[in-house]
Amino acid sequence: PGSVPHVLILIGARVGDLASAFPSDSLLEAMRLDSLARVQRADSLAQVARAARAARRDSLLRARTSPMLGGSPTAGVPAPRDSTP
C-alpha cells in the first residue's frame, strides 16, 4: 500500500463488472456540459436579481423625487454649498 499512488474505492452493491466504475468519455463530457449549464443558469439568475434590485432602487428614487407621488423634487439632490463665509 505504501507504493501505490492512487486508490479507487467502490461502494454500493457488489458488481462483477468493473466497467460501470469508469465512466465513458461521452458520459464525462455530458457531466461537464451539465455542470457548465448549471453555472450559466446561476449567473443568469444572479444577473436578473441585480437588474431587479437596480430597477427597484431607481423606482424608489423616482417616487421620492416625484411631487405627484408625494415626494420632494429636490429629494436626493445635494443642497448647494453656501459660498459666503
Image (cartoon, helix red, strand yellow):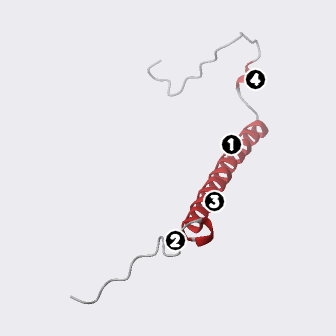
User: Counting residues from the N terminus, which is met first, the one under dot 1 or under dot 3?
Assistant: 1
User: Counting residues from the N terminus, which is met first, the one under dot 2 or under dot 3?
Assistant: 3
For disc 2, the neighbor class at 10 Å (few under 14, some 14 to 19, many from 20) is some
Residue type indicated by callout 1: Ser
Q: Nearer the viewer, residue 81 or 68?
A: 68
Residue type indicated by callout 2: Ser
Farthest residue toward the left?
85
Q: Which numbered disc covers residue 35?
A: 1
The residue positioned 50% from the left and 28% from the top of the image is: 5
Q: On the picture, is 34 further left or further right than 7?
A: right
Disc nearest the viewer among 4 and 2 = 2
How far is mark 4 from mark 2, CA to CA? 70 Å
**Residue holding disc 3:** 51
**Residue holding disc 4:** 20
Residue 74 screen position, x and y as percent:
49, 75
Residue 64 screen position, x and y as percent:
54, 66
Quadrant the C terminus occupies: bottom left
For disc 1, the neighbor class at 10 Å (few under 14, some 14 to 19, many from 20) is few
**Residue holding disc 2:** 72
How far is mark 1 from mark 2, CA to CA? 50 Å
Residue type indicated by callout 4: Ser
